């Protein structure tokens, strides 16, 4: 049983950006995002750009990622309000963007995602302590 728990824990870390989760609520809010985006400082570009510190930046300007023309030419500055509108309906907010996400209709979930993005990502937990907690069933 311990091996199963440890395996599940390691799989969860891999799916969530290797420990970038701050709270269970934050993890739930960004669960749909972590397949394409990383949130930690210096995180990898996946099929979407790294989102660390994105609030206050102009859309489509991060070096090292191939943005759509729509995103690059939008001139939009990512604020909590613009992020909320984009996350609600990306294709409607910015026609021609390439994000493969239909949107989040739940305003509370969008607010959690935006709050997570505003706060950046906390350092990864101490993996030895986390493994012990998982193995003990905590």
Image: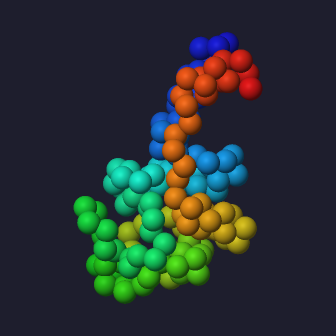
Q: Quadrant of the N terminus?
A: top right
- Seen in the picture, residue 123 relative to 11 is either above or below; the reply is below
What is the image's colouring? rainbow
Identified at 71% across, 18% down, the residue is 136
At which x and y percent is residue 58?
A: 38, 79
Q: Which is nearer the eye, 24 or 48?
A: 24
Q: Which is nearer the eye, 129 or 43?
A: 129
Q: Quadrant of residue 98?
A: bottom left
Identified at 28% across, 63% down, the residue is 65
Residue 36 in sight in this render: no
Q: Quadrant of residue 7?
A: top right
Q: Which is nearer the eye, 112 or 102?
A: 112
How many callouts does the rendering have? 0
Residue 31 in sight in this render: yes
- Along the horizontal axis of the image, is 41 left or right of 116? left
At which x and y percent is residue 81?
A: 58, 81
- Seen in the picture, residue 121 relative to 10 is either above or below; the reply is below
Q: Quadrant of the C terminus?
A: top right
Identified at 55% across, 23% down, the residue is 128
Identified at 54% across, 75% down, the residue is 83
At which x and y percent is residue 82?
A: 53, 81
- Seen in the picture, residue 41 relative to 94 is either above or below; the reply is above
At which x and y percent is residue 87?
A: 56, 71
- Seen in the picture, residue 72 relative to 1 is either above or below; the reply is below
Q: Which is nearer the eye, 40 or 71?
A: 40
């Amino acid at each position: 049983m311990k091996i199963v728990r440890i395996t599940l824990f390691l799989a969860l870390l891999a799916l969530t950006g290797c420990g970038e989760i701050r709270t269970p609520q934050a993890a739930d809010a960004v669960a749909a995002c972590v397949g394409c985006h990383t949130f930690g400082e210096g995180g990898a570009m996946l099929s979407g750009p790294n989102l660390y510190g994105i609030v206050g930046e102009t859309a489509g300007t991060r070096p090292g990622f191939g943005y759509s023309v729509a995103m690059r030419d939008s001139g939009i500055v990512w604020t909590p309000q613009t992020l909320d509108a984009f996350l609600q309906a990306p294709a409607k907010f910015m026609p021609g963007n390439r994000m493969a996400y239909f949107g989040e209709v739940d305003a509370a979930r969008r607010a959690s995602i935006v709050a997570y993005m505003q706060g950046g990502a906390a350092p990864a937990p101490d993996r030895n302590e986390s493994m012990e907690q998982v193995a003990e069933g905590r």
